[in-house]
Amino acid sequence: MKDISIIIPTFNNVEYLDECLNSVLEAGKNKNIEILVGIDNCEKTFNYVNSKNWNSLITFYYFENNVGPYVVKNSLISESGSDKIIFFDSDDVMCDNMIDYIFDNLNTYRFVRPKMFEFIDVITESMKLGEHACGVIGIDKNLFLEYNGYEPWPCGADSEFLNRMSKNNITCFKSENELMYRRIHNSSLTKKDETSLLSPLRAEQIKKIAMKSFKGQFGPLDKINVGNFKKIIK
C-alpha cells in the first residue's frame, strides 16, 4: 500500500503542469507516494502528456467527457492505493514539507486544510498570504467515500463539501504554516468570467448550499458522481 495518494485534475494548463508535478515529487521524496493526474477531456493536455517521459510515480488518466475537477477527484479515488488522499490542483505548487505535514496529521485528524501563499507568475519573497485552501485538502479516504465525495458541479463543490463536513462536526485540522503556493491567473476557476467568485453560476451554487443547510441536508450525497476514463499507457 502507498503511504499517500495525490490526485490532481487538469484542463488546458500545460504551461503549469511540470512545475506542479515536480513540486509534488520533491515534497513526496520521503514517502511512498503515487500521483494520479486526471486529464479532463482536453486534447491539448493529452498530446502534451504523450510527448514526454514522466516519472514512474505519475499515472495519467483521460476522461471521455469534460466533467469538471470535482468529478475527476471523485472518480480517481477508486484508483488510489492509499487510505490517505491529497487533492491538489495542477496550477499550484507544493512546499517541500506539505506531504509530510499532511501525512503526519492524517494520523490524528481525518481532514486537513493547508494554509497557502498566493502568487502571480513567479514565486517571490513578497507573496500575498492567503487563507486556508478549500479545494486543496488532505483527507481520510474512507471519510470521503462515506459522504460520497463532491457534488458534480463545475465550481463551488469544495465549499459545499466543507459545509457538509462542518455540519457533521468532522474536525478539520488547519495548518499553522503555509504549505503551498496558489497561482493566480486568468484561466483559473476563480478568475474566469463564467465561474468567477462574482459569476451567476457561483451565486447559484451559494443558494444551493444555503438551501441544503435550511433543509438540514448534511448527510452523504445519494451517490458518488463519477465519469468514464481510461488509463494512459505509454
Image (tube, rainbow, N blue to C red):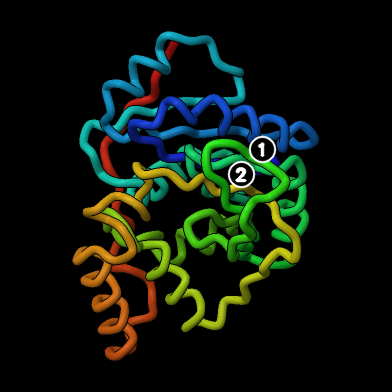
Q: Residue 82 carries which label?
A: 2
Q: Assign a secondary structure to mark 2.
A: loop
Give residue 230's position: percent from left, percent from top.
33, 27
Mark 2 neighbour density, 10 Å: few (under 14) some (14–19) many (20 or more): some
* Numbered badge on residue 2: 1
Which residue is at the front of the view, 148 or 152? 152
Q: Nearer the viewer, residue 228 or 48?
A: 48
Q: Is mark 1 on a helix, strand or loop?
A: loop
Number of marks present in the image shown: 2
**For marks 2 and 1 on the same chain, the one whose residue lies earlier in the sequence:** 1
Q: Where is residue 139 in the image (x, y as percent from the top left)?
A: 58, 58
Real-space Cα separation, disc 2 to disc 1, in angstroms: 5 Å
Q: In this orientation, which residue lies closer to the viewer: 223 or 103?
A: 103
Task: State which quadrant residue 202 falls in.
Answer: bottom left
Image position of 184 with respect to 173: above or below = above
Q: In which quarter of the image is residue 190?
A: bottom left
Which disc is residue 191 wearing?
A: none
The residue lying at 34 percent from left, 42 percent from top is 187
Q: Which amino acid does label 1 sit on?
A: Lys
Determine crowd level at label 1: few under 14, some 14-19, many 20+ residues with C-alpha closer than 10 A.
Answer: few
Please tell me which residue is depicted at 48% across the width and 10% down the height of the picture.
52
The residue under the point 30% across, 83% down is 210
Residue depicted at 42% across the width and 62% down the height: 158
Name the kind of residue labelled 2 in the image. Ser
In the rendered image, which quarter contains the N terminus? top right
Answer above or below: position of 178 versus 202: above
| Residue 11 in picture, x, y percent from top left | 34, 35
For the C terminus, the image quarter is top left
| Tags 2 and 1 touching, CB below 8 Å | yes
State left or right for residue 105 relative to residue 215.
Answer: right
Image position, residue 59 (x, y; %): 50, 25
Residue extending farthest to the front is 126
